[in-house]
Amino acid sequence: MIRHIVMWSLKEGADGFTKPENALRLKAWLDECRDAVPGMLRFEAIVAHEGLESTCDVMLYSEFTSRAALDAYNAHPKHERLKARVAPLRDGRHSFDYEI
């Protein structure tokens, strides 16, 4: 199994929205990618909660049955569309994939 974790920091005012508004937009776009490919076991988009410690604005926690399933997700048109939508909003991105 492969775990795929991505964290984004967002720009204030990007696309004319506040950072919290853009975080909710990004979460909605991520939610559209849920169940995009066979082998996706878990796909959870989380927005940082005010009052709780966080160094990012949005996080994706996902699990895939195999590296091939993750590769299929990365190449999927929904994922390609997501990358294009988030590019102007993001200030930073960190990712971490690991096999268990």
Image (cartoon, rainbow, N blue to C red):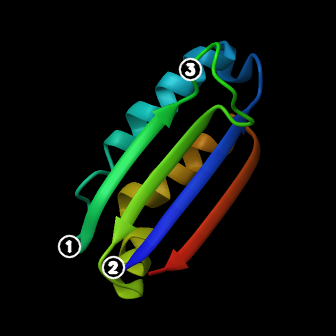
Instruction: Pick whichever, 65 or 30, lies toward us.
Output: 65
Q: How crowded is mark 2: few (under 14 residues within 10 Å), some or many (20 or more)?
A: some
The numbered mark, 2 or 1, whose residue comes first in the sequence reads 1
Q: Position of residue 59 (x, y in %)?
A: 55, 43
Neighbourhood count class around disc 3 (C-alpha, 10 Å): few under 14, some 14–19, many 20 upward:
few
Q: Earlier in the sequence, mark 1 or mark 3?
A: 1
**Relative image position of residue 71 (x, y in whole percent):** 43, 80
Residue holding disc 2: 69
The kind of residue tagged 1 is: Pro
Q: Distance between the residues labelled 2 and 3?
A: 30 Å
Tag 2, which secondary structure?
helix
Q: Residue at x 38, y 69 (%)?
A: 73
- Residue in view at x 37 percent, y 46 percent: 44
Q: Name the residue under label 3.
A: 49
Q: Which amino acid does label 2 sit on?
A: Ala
Nearer the observer: mark 1 or 3; the answer is 3
Q: What is the C-alpha distance between the residues marked 1 and 3?
A: 31 Å
> Which residue lies at the image location 61% right of the left edge and 16% below the top edge?
20
Residue 5 to residue 75: above or below: above
Q: Where is residue 99 in the image (x, y as percent from the top left)?
A: 48, 82
Which residue, given by chain and number where applicable, does mark 1 sit on?
A: 38
Could you tell me if the residues under marks 2 and 1 are in contact, i.e. CB atoms within 8 Å? Answer: yes
